[in-house]
Image (cartoon, grey):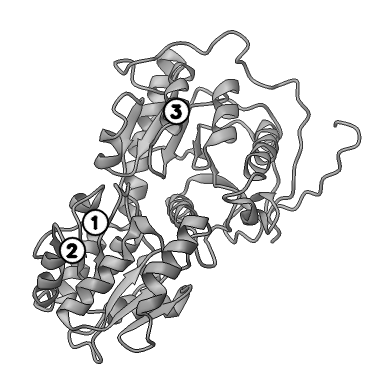
Amino acid sequence: MMAGRRTTVRRRGGSRRPGPLSTGGTRSVVGMRRRIALIAPPWYPVPPHGYGGTELVVGLLAAELRDQGHDVELIAAEGSALATWTAAPRGWDAALGGEERHLRDLTYASRVLDLLDGLGPFDLVHDHSGAAVLFGLAAQSPAPIVHTVHGLIAEPLRTFLESLGPYGVAMIAISEAQRRSAPALPWAATVHNAVDLSALRVGEPERNPPYLLSLARVCPAKGQHLAIEAARRAGRRLVLAGKVEASAEGAEYYQRQIVPHLDGDRVVHIHNVAGEEKARLLAGASALLAPLQWDEPFGLYMAEAMVSGTPVIAFPRGAAPELVDPGQTGFLVDDVEAMAAAISLADRIDPERCARHARRRFDPRRMAAEYLRAYGGAIARWSITGVAVPPALPALGQPPPGGERRRDLPVERYGAAAG
């Protein structure tokens, strides 16, 4: 143990088997019980207490894999009910958008990698954090590594992910639209996100009093000012729900384009919603408006609305055309005028039918099954080639010299989840 570094080990249940990371070489058959390391971002608990789309997805995946009998080690932020190990204290989310973020990210990566060194062997490591954690995993090549890309792939993220091709990292896209935005990446699969079906309920066919809903962080990319205009043209009440983006642009957008329209009656803003309040808002809305001003790679709030029986009216950008089934779970429109016109059409969509269709598509069991297929492919390729990505994809190769495992580093356990 490195001198001067103190840690406290608190793990939920069971004992740990020390040893280096490796696949073990014997559990590569699809359908067998696997030992999987899931790495969540360090910013919010898993599952989140409010905001935290990635953390919600990671939590659903961890729970479903465990329910199916797989051995899942989940490393996440403090306060995570589903984590077996925590490597980031509460409050680190304050660094988001600031200069300290990269230092928090590096610290988290160091802790995660040291933890994994003492927790192996694993059949596969599935990273959802990215950045420093992903680079560290790639450099030490401990086991087949897959990484789910949860955000927009713009430069310089695209360049960073492309640089990991020779290290054998297999990428998972959350939509075909996201995948098309960076076709040169070593994609292994596209897996749509799931939502927590048990936390959402289906609304009644008659919603009284009727209202429209915009459920997203308030920023120019989400286009809440256009949702306000569409609701005004349709003569409907609009509820805006979501925190204002923590940026100068977000604050200016809110003050200039949203606040002047807030009257506490026709246009209302709820700054943050979660739990029962969120489920009630989704189930009670006549429609959810998503006048997207960016190529959103997924949009969990759209899936959550549809599984609640609330149709989505969205601009056809990003993944929206993959998520919304016109006439069944919502409508795709090109402008504010068409959005306003579609609001009356949304009243004709049966909530029960909308919810049944959406709940099949965004079921955590479906998501877990697709990830397990991707895991099986990555493990099979690893056993043959030593890399997890398909050999036909570009920029492949063996890990560079010096990129071997950090077996000489001490085992550091930064606080297992209490339980």
Q: Can you tell which of label 2 and label 3 is closer to the viewer?
A: 3
Quadrant of the rendering where the N terminus is positioned: top right
Which residue is denoted by mark 3 in the rendering? 161
Q: Position of residue 111 (x, y in %)?
A: 70, 39
- Residue nearest the observer in this picture, 180 or 144: 180
Q: Residues within 10 Å of mark 3 (few under 14, many from 20)?
A: many
Left or right placement of residue 345 versus residue 313 in this view = left
**Mark nearer the N terminus (1 vs 3):** 3
Q: Residues within 10 Å of mark 1 (few under 14, many from 20)?
A: some
Q: CA distance from mark 2 to mark 1?
A: 7 Å
Q: Position of residue 36 (x, y in %)?
A: 51, 39
Which residue is denoted by mark 2 in the rendering? 357
Q: CA distance from mark 1 to mark 3?
A: 28 Å
Give the image quarter of residue 378: top left
Give the amino acid at mark 1. Arg
Give the amino acid at mark 3. Leu
Which residue is denoted by mark 1 in the rendering? 361
Element marked by disc 1: helix
